[in-house]
Structure formats: structure tokens, C-alpha cells
Image (spheres, rainbow, N blue to C red):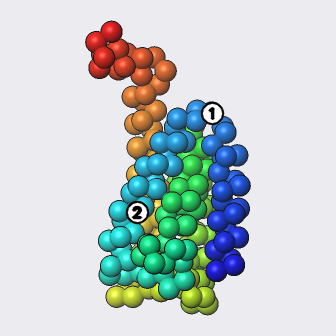
Amino acid sequence: MKFLYGLLILSIGFLPVLMKRPPKKDWLFAYMFNAITNIILDKMVTSSFISYPTRLLPKIFHIHILYDVLLYPMFTVLYNQLTRKDKRTAIIYKLLLFSVPLTIFESWAERKTGLIKWSNGWQWYHTFLSVNLKSLITRGMVSLFRKFFTEGRSRTLYTTLLGK
């Protein structure tokens, strides 16, 4: 639990620094999209494949709220910031720089700690594939968000919706 509380404090401290870079609305969108979809997906996965014996607020949440709402969304924001202007090949390479260590850490945590428990055939490659797919989907959604809500377009959309 000390490890989890330490991560919580570090995450809360690092979050404002991460969100400070412009364009802030893109990073806020990436963060919120990732956090909301993490909660939905983790509820499905925890019912069949993964459990978190040691987690914050266990009487309230069956999911790993620290990972779903803070750690992984922050990872996604950082990844999106680092790949903002990259081409597809660089996007994939940079994703691997994040997803490989994350998968290794989760595999280690599953074997050596009480933080996570896999069942019903869940393996490290399921984590690896799901993190990569989810990160690419979030990156795509941020790109779409950026395309439709740039400064000029958002004003046009705003005036169209409000009729002004």
C-alpha cells in the first residue's frame, strides 16, 4: 500500500506539469477519453481476467482506480505529446518505448507482488496488445479532436450550434 500511495502522490504532483504544455485542450481530451474508457474496459476485464488484490479504495472500487484514472491516462497524455507531429512509423516506435516497459512491469507485478492477479488465460501479450491498441485508438481520437476543434473550426462550430 505504501508503494501505491507513493505513486498516487507522484502522479498528483506530476499531473499539472504534464497538462501545462499547449494545446491544453488536446491533453485534457486525451486524459478524459482515456480515463473514462479505462474505467469501462477495466470493469469488463476485472470480471473475468484480472483482479487487483491490493488496490486503493478496495471497498469502493473493484478496478485499479490509481492506474485507470491517473497513471495510464498520464502515460497516454505524455505519449500524445511526444508524437503530436510524428509520422506513423515514429508513432509506433515511440509507443513501443512505453508499452514494452509497462508490460514488463505488469508481468513482474503479477508474479512477484500482490498488486495484480491474472486468470482465465490472461498473459503478458494480452496486456501488451491491449495497451498498444488502446493507446493508438486514443491517439486517433485526439487527432480527430484536434482536426475538428482547432481554433477557427471551434468558433465556426460554436456559432453554427448557437446560431450567432
Q: CA distance from mark 1 to mark 2?
A: 26 Å
- Left or right relative to 44: residue 129: right
Can residue 106 be seen by looking at this rendering? yes
Q: Residue at x 52, y 35 (%)?
A: 25
**Which kind of residue does numbered mark 2 sit on?**
Ile
In this rendering, is residue 149 above or below 103? Answer: above
In this rendering, is residue 127 above or below 36? Answer: below
Q: Residue at x 58, y 69 (%)?
A: 102
- Left or right relative to 85: residue 43: left
- Left or right relative to 133: residue 113: right
**Which kind of residue does numbered mark 1 sit on?**
Pro
Disc 2 target residue: 39
Picture disc at residue 22: 1
In depth, the one of 146 and 90 nearer the eye is: 146
Seen from this angle, which residue lies furthest top? 164
Picture disc at residue 146: none
Can residue 124 be seen by looking at this rendering? no
Residue 31 x/y as whole percent: 51, 49
The N terminus lies in quadrant: bottom right
In the rendered image, which quarter is residue 104 located in? bottom right
Residue 87 x/y as whole percent: 53, 41
In this rendering, is residue 121 above or below 151? Answer: below
Q: Secondary structure at mark 2?
A: helix
Residue 134 x/y as whole percent: 42, 58
